Image (cartoon, helix red, strand yellow):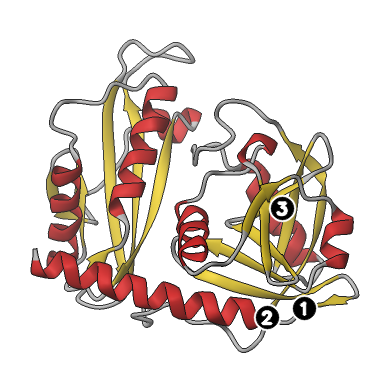
Amino acid sequence: MTYVFHRGEYISENQAYITRDNRAFRLGDGCFESIRVAHGVALYIEAHYARACETLRSLHIDIPDGFTLDALRSQVQGLLLRNQIASGGRVRITFYRKSTGFYLPRENELAYLIESEPMLDNEFHLSTVGRTVDIFADLKKDINRLSVFKTLNTQIYVMAAIHARNKGLDDALIQNHRMALIEATASNFFIVSNGVLYTPQLQDGCVGGTMRMNVINLALTHQIKVYECTINPQNLLAADEMFLTNAIQGIEWVSGYRTKRYFNQMSKRLVQILNEHSAGYAARFRNS
């Protein structure tokens, strides 16, 4: 039996349901977090909790007193235990406004669903085959105060992913209305030039990914220079490397953008650093 945590209790996934007036389903009124599990521990849950709270405040969804980091960590770890995930896995938490009403809600109460599933890999791995990407030009992402958050309004990412599949590519890069490249369909991205990392700045509209920030911090700790800046298509052609980052996959190197081909030396180094840091994080949690 597989369990989920919904509205304060662990229940069978077969018992989980949504009503027809659920605002996540009808209006996309909410946000979500995807969390990687390694060594049976939800990694970097502090960053996910902090971003979830910031997003909920921006969406004017009330955060109850009982929704603390310790409570959320306990709920997630309890679900992993019930689902017998003792090594690698993934967790998704969907937060939504528990209320009736149409566009205007009658209340701003918080509800959320936690799901988990196992993964074969207990660590982050760099594929031997890099990903191929191109630019998704059909739609542009707006820049506003919600751009940096993982809201349930994901239509542009769905359309970009379909575009990539139809073109025989592994992923697509999304632009803002200023034509700057900001992210991929489910990832932030970095380029490498002369050993220096460059990644789109939040002001250009990319999601403030937890793995993005993790990679930035780990790189700086290991004396690797990082710049957050505006990145345009011509910068991709001049780069030595390119890689994608997200909380679940960690780091994925890009082998090709159009006719451009990339190396993956920096990607390999960062995956090793990330795995060492993640193992240490899990060990500290288990020993606490």
Q: Is residue 158 left or right of residue 117?
A: right
Question: Which image quadrant is residue 63 in?
Answer: top left
Residue 20 visible (yes or no): no
Q: Disc 1 marks which amino acid? A: Tyr
Q: Is residue 179 left or right of residue 19?
A: right
Residue that badge 2 annotates = 130
- Which mark's residue is nearer the viewer, 3 or 1? 1
Q: Which of marks 1 and 2 precedes in the sequence?
A: 2
- Which mark's residue is nearer the viewer, 2 or 1? 1
Q: Which of marks 1 and 3 precedes in the sequence?
A: 3
Q: Which of marks 2 and 3 precedes in the sequence?
A: 2
Q: Residue furthest left?
A: 288
Q: Residue 147 in the image: state x and y as whole percent.
A: 59, 34
Q: Residue 115 in the image: state x and y as whole percent.
A: 29, 56
- Residue shown at 75%/71% (left/top)? 194
For residue 208, which numbered disc appears in the image?
Answer: none
- Which mark's residue is nearer the viewer, 3 or 2? 2
Which is more toward the observer, 182 or 276? 276
Q: Residue furthest front?
A: 223
- Residue shown at 68%/65% (left/top)? 196
SS for callout 1: loop
Residue that badge 1 annotates = 262
Q: Disc 2 marks which amino acid? A: Gly
Residue that badge 3 annotates = 160
